[in-house]
Amino acid sequence: MSASTRTLVMMLVLGGLALGPTPALAGPLDTPGYAKAVTCSACHGANGNSRSDSMPILAGANTSFRDWSLHDPKRTLVGLANYAHVLGDAEFLRIVLPNTFGFMVASVACSLVLGLLVALMLNRRFPGRALVQSIILLPLMVAPVIAAIMIRWMFNDQFGVVNAALGVFDVAPISWLTQRWTAFFVILATDVWLWTPWFALILLAALQSLPPEPFEAAEIDAASPWRTFRYITLPMLRPVMVVCIVIRAIDAFRTFDIVWTITGGGPARATEVFSIYAYVESFQFLNLGRGSAAAVIGAVIIVIFAMALYRILNRFVEVSK
């Protein structure tokens, strides 16, 4: 058996042990059929792990078709009644969906633009660039819940440092978290602050990997910095930007922690997003059937949205190649 085959077999052994139980294998690596047995064992472990991952999804889908209230768990099949209730809920249609998609679009757009500006700045050489880069990347090291708690106290209408700073300019205290749009702005600003360094880091790596020849040609042709950015830098960054947008949009759609920590979906459910709605239905109204139906609807929406977004963005650049 060659060295490369031995290495492959050892990797499969470790993978099989990590993924699931494997049958007892004994004997030297040169035993006939040993590599085949190890391969089958590792694949068996992977299949078992896949089945275990799908069980919660199937259980949730099953719950969505049942009358499953925690205070009276009949668990009787009700068909699509839970889905009809969620889709007919005025709170879901007029507040939750607009909040979710508005938050997703605004957060992704602001984070992308600011991240691109930061990446372009860090791509230039200047004194103290390493220090500035470290400071800008600090939000990546902060847990979202910790950041949300910090922001909630900063925008407190009585003790917050934001109102204290505004008071220096004779601005009356603002009740940031008791009004819909100011509370939504605080949530959005927190999310943008957390995710701008993520965009900046990825786009900076993409900028530093671009070939120098097009920029040298643009410099010889005396192209302005704006035309160089618009016609050379931006088109070459589009594949990376498309992938970042799709990944971040999916993540923004399921945002829970910072919204729940800052406002809890309030005031009066005015800042409630999709994940908060599913949580409230399940664990505050104690109706697992409706909460599961909301989760399934959300999964379908985000899959359709992600596919449509990818196709739309892919018209500008072919990401798959």
Image: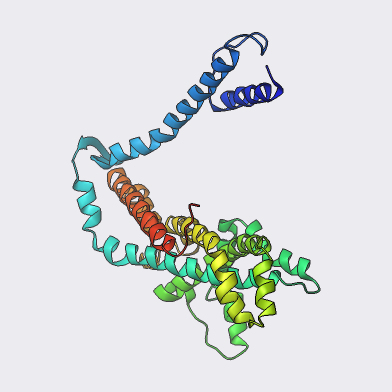
Give the quadrant of residue 140: bottom right
**Residue 27 placement (x, y as % from top left):** 65, 8
- Using the image as rendered, state which of residue 290 and residue 6 is in the foreground: 6
**Residue 73 placement (x, y as % from top left):** 26, 37
In the displayed structure, 24 sits above or below 53; it is above
**Residue 186 placement (x, y as % from top left):** 50, 71
- Using the image as rendered, state which of residue 286 and residue 271 is in the foreground: 271
Report the side of 116 relative to 181 (left or right).
Answer: right
In the displayed structure, 15 sits above or below 244; it is above
**Quarter occupied by the N terminus:** top right
Report the side of 304 relative to 48 (left or right).
Answer: left
Give the quadrant of residue 80: top left
In the displayed structure, 154 sits above or below 83; it is below
Furthest toward the right, the residue is 127
Residue at point 64% right, 61% down? 201
Residue at point 41% right, 75% down? 181
Residue at point 44% right, 55% down? 250
- Using the image as rendered, state which of residue 256 and residue 225 is in the foreground: 225
